[in-house]
Image (cartoon, grey):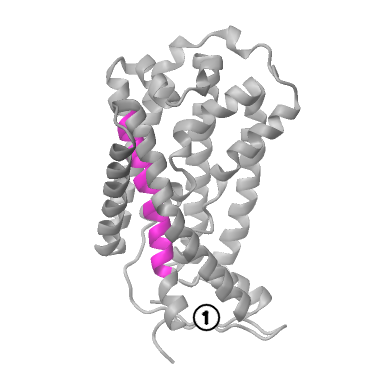
Amino acid sequence: MSESTVLAVPRPGAAVALAPAAASPRLTTARGAALYIGALLGPGLLLLPGLAAAQAGPASLLAWAGLLGLSALFAVVFTALGRAFPSAGGVIGYVSAGLGARQGLAAGWSFLAGVIAGAPVVCLIGAGYLTELTGGGRVGQAVIAAALLLTVLALAAGGMRTSATAQLLMVSLLIVVVIVAVAGSAASAHAANWTPFAPHGWLAVGHAATTLMLSFVGWEAVAPLTAQFADPARQLPRVVGITLAVTSVLYLGLAVVTIAVLGTGGGSMAPLADLLRHAIGPAGTAAGAVAAIVLTLGAVNAYVNGAAAMTGRLLGGRDP
């Protein structure tokens, strides 16, 4: 048997056997958590707190809370699957174990196609936020998006350690920027922004949840990276716990402050930058631009690394 980890797709009722993994670049808990956080966050963090507040007012917090609870359930499921099948196949292994090899490969190719088609779109979204802040038309947006995508591909070409280290730095910077936005703008909060609590009715909470839903996908993207942990059974619960805590605090913190400070104005194209301007003045525009770059690079970096790990499983039938 090869030294690589080989996922044996079982017959119905049979067990899944995994051979020992070969030596490969290992993810530390911190770097792994950074990749997971990047997969769950994205350019949507720049816009969605304001859009949800505009749709449902303060009641949009109920949508945030419900979706965070749903994300926690996904986290539990993917943690259990990752500990049971720590393979670079990711969802390929999970689907194969339950439904068979053909369905597993279909899921893998679908994920890979989604990353190939979606990565440029995510870069365009981040670039659009950047040009909204700094100026520039469609051509400028396209050039910035191309530069962001090429940066991620260069990181991926440098290997997992390079990508994960860069991700850790980016996520750390993002956390600092969001803390500055939340803590610094809190003094500008207005109690009147909380009434009425549901200005558009309770059904608007469902509309807000629909808008926010895609903010909570991403667990599947980093599933192929479980084989990069030296001890998935021990590290995965820690990584997932850190990821849930950080994403919950960032999302809810921004949602609360967006309502408290910006009120109905939270639906602008750049609510995070608006909060940063309340916190640190004109420099907030530059800080918002940095956040746009970091969020875009972080999300695409996580997805590209997951897709790269899965590609070896799709093309060769073995983990890389």
- Compared across the picture, whether 100 is left or right of 273 comes to right
**Bounds of the magenta span?**
288-309
| Residue 116 percent location from the top left of the image | 43, 60
Viewport quadrant of the N terminus = bottom left
| Residue 226 percent location from the top left of the image | 46, 65
Front residue of 238 and 96 = 96
User: Was residue 293 drawn as part of the magenta stretch in this picture?
Assistant: yes
Question: Which residue is at the far right?
Answer: 202
| Residue 200 percent location from the top left of the image | 70, 20
Most prominent secondary structure in the magenta stretch?
Answer: helix
Dividing the picture into quarters, in which one does residue 140 lie? top left
Q: Which residue is mark 1?
A: 7
Residue under the image location 67 percent in, 86 percent down? 11
Q: Is residue 229 visible?
A: no
Mark 1 closeness class: few <14, some 14–19, many ≥20 residues within 10 Å: many
Front residue of 181 and 293 = 293
Residue under the image location 28 percent in, 42 percent down? 144
Dividing the picture into quarters, in which one does residue 138 lie? top left
- Compared across the picture, whether 262 is left or right of 152 comes to right
Residue under the image location 30 percent in, 61 percent down? 156
Position of residue 177 relative to residue 316, above or below, is above
User: Was residue 246 drawn as part of the magenta stretch in this picture?
Assistant: no
Residue under the image location 56 percent in, 84 percent down? 8
Position of residue 277 relative to residue 52, above or below, is above
Q: Is residue 104 visible?
A: yes
- Compared across the picture, whether 45 is left or right of 173 comes to right
- Compared across the picture, whether 139 is left or right of 267 comes to left
| Count of numbered circles in the view | 1
Secondary structure of the residue carrying numbered label 1: loop
| Residue 55 percent location from the top left of the image | 63, 25
Q: Amino acid at mark 1?
A: Leu
